[in-house]
Image (cartoon, coloured by chain):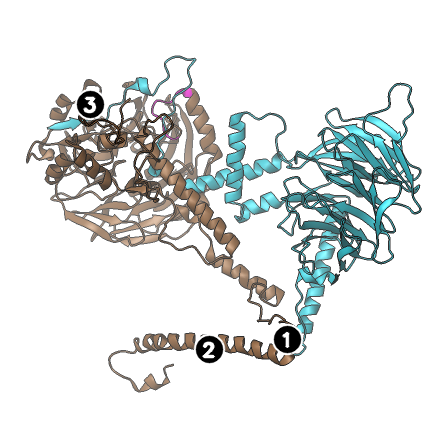
Chain colours: A brown, B cyan
Amino acid sequence: METAPKLGRDVPPKKDKLQAKKKKPRRYWEEETPPTAAGAFPGPPRKLKRNRELRPQKPKNIHIRKKSRISKKPQVPKKPRERGPQRSLSGAQDPFAGPAPVPGEVVQKFRRVDKSKKLPRSKSKTRSRLEAAEAEEEEVSVRAARSELLLAEEPGFLEGEDGEDTARIRQADIVEAVDIASAAKHFDLNLRQFGPYRLNYSRTGRHLAFGGRRGHVAALDWVTKKLMCEINVMEAVRDIRFLHSEALLAVAQNRWLHIYDNQGIELHCIRRCDRVTRLEFLPFHFLLATASETGFLTYLDVSVGKIVAALNARAGRLDVMTQNPYNAVIHLGHSNGTVSLWSPAMKEPLAKILCHRGGVRAVAVDSTGTHMATSGVDHQLKIFDLRGTFQPLSARTLPQGAGHLAFSQRGLLAAGMGDVVNVWAGQCKASPPLLEQPYLTHRLSGHVHSLQFCPFEDVLGVGHSGGITSMLIPGAAEPNFDGLENNPYRSQKQRQEWEVKALLEKVPAELICLDPRALAEVDVISLEQKKKERIERLGYDPEAKAPFQPKPKRKGRSSTASLVKRKRKVMDEEHRDRVRQSLEEQPQKQEKAAKPTGARPSALDRFVR
Amino acid sequence: MKVKMLSRNPDNYVRETKLDLQRVPRNYDPTLHPFEVPREYVRALNATKLERVFAKPFLASLDGHRDGVNCLAKHPKSLATVLSGACDGEVRIWNLTKRKCIRTIQAHEGFVRGICTRFCGTSFFTVGDDKTVKQWKMDGPGYGEEDEPLHTILGKTVYTGIDHHWKEPVFATCGQQVDIWDEQRTNPICSMTWGFDSISSVKFNPIETFLLGSCASDRNIVLYDMRQATPLEKVILDMRTNTICWNPMEAFIFTAANEDYNLYTFDMRALDTPVMVHMDHVSAVLDVDYSPTGKEFVSASFDKSIRIFPVDKSRSREVYHTKRMQHVICVKWTSDSKYIMCGSDEMNIRLWKANASEKLGVLTSREKAATDYNQKLKEKFQHHPHIKRISRHRHLPKSIYSQIQEQRIMKEARRRKELNRIKHSKPGSVQIVSEKKKHIVAVVK
């Protein structure tokens, strides 16, 4: 067993030297930069130098090591633990005294409550309960942050040599450089006959379905390249989408919406959804959203087969649609340059964002729901902030506007422009992609017709007029999946179990709104209303402060006069407070009132109160 | 060029043989678990619905008495043993696991008014209408022996209640006065009176063991200290209190079951305002007993139902009734806090679960985890209207339901009248009295 360098005085100096030469215990959190650090993330080339510096280096001496530990800022627990290693009964020292430090930004990732928000004014009992709950939440986020350590996989990356532009690296080079298993993920399906293809990956990323304009529909396990079904529906296929599992497939055909199973057997023909152009599936609500040529956005509940809502967008033909995976809001792009946000609970859009001059060609939303990328007929590609402000963060004019956009799980943005696919990357997972320099580009054998990043694999699927291409994009996907949500390796039994659980906790369609956490917050408005109603019903405010009642004092001091005097004193004090408060408020009010009257004084100003 | 692609080794994710457990790697990243709150909400809703589906509280009915059950007592050492006294003077000892009567004693002539066990569990005391106090052995008589009481004390007046001290060989009876007896003597150590009315029940405090509480039919609750010869304090309420019960965890808290359909939880240090008024019964409350956790109590009422109240809530969380259960005279919460027993007019003792939807028997660790998780979810979303409505819904017999409506109307009318009085009189001349203070007439020291 290794001992820590700090030893007692009674140890002879010679031995001490030997001990010092010995390696210090390696701490697992110091060993290498964690996978989420900037170095592991695929970034644009100009960041490369810094990235290299951040790449794992073995610290040379103790001094640096200590420094690196400080820079990590062990935030939790906040109590000072600088007491040094403690001796146990056997004389051995614990080199890792105290709980393991957790980096603050990782904890931040798991934090659910906003600590900057103050707790509402409430009774002491409620307040203490709230505080306890908050402390519990904090503990949970620290524990979750600590469990990051157990994640097995690290994300992929691609770096050029000094000054080399990653965008110049061709797919063939990547295929050559990577291992055989990864190289097998790059493939081309040459299907010129049945025209531009739409494709869709299942939620686990194991299965791929594609449908050609001329009626060719196929589904396969793309990892093993095992074909599940292949049919020709003898009708134009506009869009194709997997439902909650790979066993069901929705195909938007020329007239109606059809649902097939993985054998290619037609299960349903939904005639209420006609001339559908785009499909989106909301997996937690079991809703299939369809946008049609007639301008209707229809939500179909696939678990019971009912149409939940049919909303008229009043904006003509709808052919640009995407979903926000964070809050299940549907984004529709319109020909007047606006993007409207829809929920099945509302007849009107939740928000309308004017994004482009001219029509919107493509919309994509990233997995955290913070960024939206749009491209328009005006050849612009813009990134919008979706957290409340809906303002553009960055914009770029492309020589040939992007017709298709897709975000990856780790925030990479892919755009299909003619027969070229560009991929942009950001600084880290949470930041928006930087549009100056593409991360990768690729030229295909036909015009791009659809794009999707494969979940949990570093693969971008492109459907084009020449067939299907599966591109390798290192660093695109989330490396560590959750076995209970989407498990690419799940067995049939596990899938069945998951299906039952998912159906049991199907979220009602009415709960779709911009902020999915709103359900956990206090509904202040209805609370106030309730309070008001209660006061009206009772005739008095039961929670109002009772008027001051002086307590009887010692014998002889509690005469009526002195009681009245004490009462008076308190009342006067309260009154003075009120006056002071109103005086403080008055100038503010006057300022407010003065402002709206314009620059020129009017004769009517004298009547303004 | 440096490149690394995400490439997983399937061996790390798939089990090796069919005998292994499936591997489930976890990643708690919030972006992989979207809609956390709505999904939890749906889970909470499902859990609430399941709770209502599985709410089957009635366990067993112990029949055998030939007259209404008047009093119940728990065994201090054995969870399975329960004692009951009936209106025909018969005392029965029951085994709850077998749900059978194990012993029958014809103890008194007329009612058995009170029954209590000694703290060691070897004997028990009964009082009856025949003006006697009898001590009995818990074990039955040997073969060929007569079933005779250990001691019999002949009193001058009728005793209406009895309770044993929690640690010492002392017991208290009540009737015209509160008597404190030494087990070895035939005369009381001391007798205490305050007023001249019959006292209906007397209870020892389980923590501060020298304290006693009694309630009399002249509407008052009197507190005594056994070490003093005179009573401590009394509070007079609007109507008469039938019985009281001390909180087993908080020494100074007790709850009184009143004739005016309410229960009052008092802090004995400040008797002028009850800590809580528990209202939900629609007829006189006849008996009350605390759960051993001190968080909840159960009350039995003349309206043929029993209700469970949290100590700090004014409304009940649960109501139990059956078609055949008549006026419930006595109720007890078992010492493992899992079951409730009630004795009623129609000669039966009923056994209920304290938590209606609880699964009995040994739970696997996964079941336990699931119930804990569901419990937490229900707690988290308890104020959401949909969940609240489902969890509060109870089926009530028509008589109780209509009486509740009737009383609501009456209360509304009284309130309206009071409001009108305030409105039409000089401001400040009519005092608004809170519900807690309304029912207290006076406190006398």
* Element marked by disc 2: helix
Q: Earlier in the sequence, mark 1 or mark 2?
A: 1
Q: Which residue is mark 2?
A: A576
Residue at 33% x, 25% y is A488
Q: Which residue is mark 1?
A: A558
Task: In this rendered view, identify the residue nearer to me: B162 or B230.
Answer: B230
Identify the main secondary structure in magenta.
Answer: loop
Q: CA distance from mark 1 to mark 2?
A: 26 Å
Task: In this rendered view, identify the residue nearer to me: A467 or A85.
Answer: A85
Label 1 or label 3, whichever lies nearer to me, is: 1
Marks 1 & 2 on one chain: yes
* Element marked by disc 1: loop
Marks 3 & 2 on one chain: yes
Q: Which residue is mark 3?
A: A187
Q: Would you say residue A374 sits in the magenta stretch?
A: no
Image position, residue B404 (x, y; %): 72, 52
Image position, residue B186 (x, y; %): 89, 40
**Relative height, residue A442 to residue B198 (above, below):** above
Question: Given the image, on which type of amino acid does mark 1 rest?
Answer: Ser
* Element marked by disc 3: strand
Image position, residue B87 (x, y; %): 88, 39
> Residues at badges 1 and 2 in contact (C-beta under 8 Å)?
no
**Relative height, residue A257 to residue A23 (above, below):** below
Q: Earlier in the sequence, mark 1 or mark 3?
A: 3
Residue at 47% x, 33% y is A503
Question: Given the image, on which type of amino acid does mark 2 rest?
Answer: Arg
Magenta segment boundaries in residue numbering: A485-492
Give left or right: position of A114 versus B430: left
